[in-house]
Amino acid sequence: MNITRRGFLKASGIAMGAMLCPAFLKDAKAKTYAWKLKTLEGTDTTTICPYCACGCGLVVTASGGKVINTEGDPDHPVNEGTLCAKGNSLYQTVNNDRRNSTVRYRAPGASDWQDITWDSAIDMIAKRIKRTRRFNFTRTDDDGNIVNRTEGIACIGGAALDNEECYLYTKLARTLGVIYIEHQARI
Ligand code: SF4
């Protein structure tokens, strides 16, 4: 029988609970309620901790449009279910009144920030990339070799990107001719 590490830990937890609290398990209503208290009705999604270069895996449980629990992913090869204090507090970045929910923009020379739409932000970024690339594009080096590169743009990936996202990100950068490519986590 195939059993995942997460499934094994879940089953072990139930077995331990049954051994330690037989009286509790006799009460079917209490048992159901205890499960509901945590994640039974939520949807689990795996993700990567965005904080540091370790790239620990997490399971995020959401219910009713809200994150109700985050915990280390026991099936993730990097952390095998563990998290440091910072990663453990990840749910606070979502359930936080101070979290920005709009794109904030401060124009050059301006002192105030303004809300702009995602469409405006993406348009603005695309135009700046295009302009920078056009004015900093090198077709051949000093020896006449074709290089087709731009040294006016650098790319750095964040820790929350996984392997597949990094692959796509690198493809885009190389397509543009970017040669300065770095990534925080290198997971
Ligand atoms: S849980 Fe801690 S060690 Fe792991 S990636 Fe997040 S910040 Fe780094």
Image: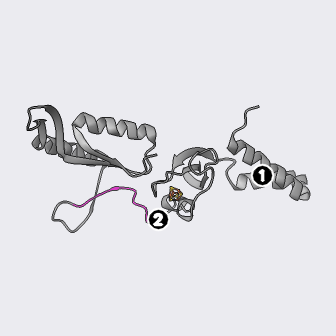
According to the image, label 2 marks what residue? 97
Query: Which numbered disc, 1 or 2, marks the residue closer to the eye?
Result: 1
Q: Which secondary structure lies at badge 1?
A: helix
- Identify which residue is drawn at 79% across, 48% down: 12
Picture mark count: 2
In the shown orientation, is residue 2 left or right of residue 31? left
**Mark 2 residue type:** Asp
Q: Position of residue 39 (x, y in %)?
A: 67, 51
Q: Quadrant of residue 172?
A: top left
Q: Position of residue 168 (x, y in %)?
A: 37, 36
- Label drawn at residue 13: 1
Q: Quadrant of residue 43?
A: top right
Respond yes or no on whether mark 2 lies under 8 Å from ligand 1: no
- Identify which residue is drawn at 59% across, 45% down: 76
Q: Residues within 10 Å of mark 2 (few under 14, many from 20)?
A: few
Q: Position of residue 163 (x, y in %)?
A: 45, 40
Q: Main secondary structure of the magenta part?
A: loop
Judged from this view, the residue extending furthest toward the front is 143
As rendered, which of 3 and 41 lies closer to the eye? Answer: 3
- Label drawn at residue 93: none
Q: Position of residue 9 (x, y in %)?
A: 73, 48
Magenta span includes 43:
no
**Mark 1 residue type:** Gly
Judged from this view, the residue extending furthest toward the bottom is 111
- The magenta-colored residue range is 97-106
